[in-house]
Image (tube, grey):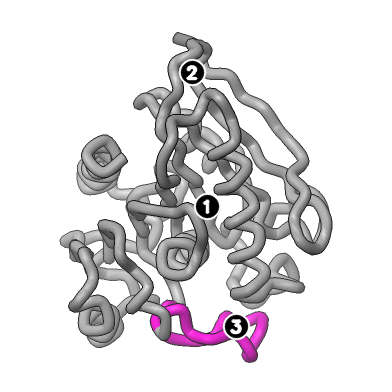
Amino acid sequence: MPIIEEEIDLAVADGTMAVVTFRDMDSVPRPAIVLVCDANGLLPATLDIARGLAAEGFVVASPDVYHHVGRMQTTDPSLPSADKMWIREGMTNEGHLLDMNALAAHLQAQDYVRDGLVGVTGFCLGGRIAFLAASRGEGFGPSVLFYPTRLHEPDPANAETAPPLMFAGGVTSPMLIFFPELDAQNPPDNIAAINQALRAAPTESVVVPNAQHGFAQPASAGYHAIEGPIAWQRCVDFFVEHL
């Protein structure tokens, strides 16, 4: 069936956050998943991924997490990270949690969403936000994190933010994490520290061989044509099982 795509304005604690939602045209309630973009914002390629996930039988919502700097702002993926820090202005852990909680509550109130917890997934910075939602959020359940960045340190745009890994004890629903083997942002010692912090949680950590940061995003320079689709199918199967 065709996918219905809608862009809504969701009232959040400090203003309005745009959200793009995707769902099947039928009236059958389906499990919901929040898909959080990477550090570049809601680019068309990210929305394509969300659309594809909806085609697997889910209601998918992608929030404009950078709403503090304007509506649906994006950056050029080819620019150095230092040139893209402006899009993170106003971001805090608490702000992300308030935004994500509002989105989960909105989804759970829709008649086209099946009763129960909301899944969450994200790429890069989106993986960090997904971890915050999975460990401290309200209404969130199973999560899939693709190469989450800075779980063990403050956000570079706000030195006052606590490292998300401090809240690892709050992870009580199944979590699947993909770490590319060749990702400089998560070298082996980082991965070991993250796994150690999550040792008591229902977490599966996967190191993807010969893969770079961005390996699961088809539009990324680091996309891996073999490992990317394999990981994505594992993500879909994970949500089918746990949602």
Q: Do the residues labelled 3 and 2 touch (CB within 8 Å)?
A: no
Q: Which tag is nearer the camera, tag 1 or tag 3?
A: 1
Tell whether 128 sits left or right of 94: left
Identity, as a three-letter code, of the amino acid under mark 1:
Val
Residue at position x 52%, y 18% in the image: 3
Tell me the element at label 3.
loop
Residue 20 at x, y = what percent? 64, 36
Give the number of the disc on residue 36. 1
Quarter holding the C terminus is top left
Residue 153 painted magenta: yes
Q: Which tag is nearer the camera, tag 1 or tag 2?
A: 2
Query: Circle 3 sits on which residue?
Result: 156
Is residue 81 visible to us here?
A: yes
Tell whether 165 sits left or right of 98: left
Magenta region's main secondary structure?
Answer: loop
Give the alpha-carbon distance from disc 1 to disc 3, as whole Å.
18 Å
Task: Please give the range of residues in magenta.
Answer: 151-165
Tell me the element at label 1.
strand
Tell me the element at label 2.
strand
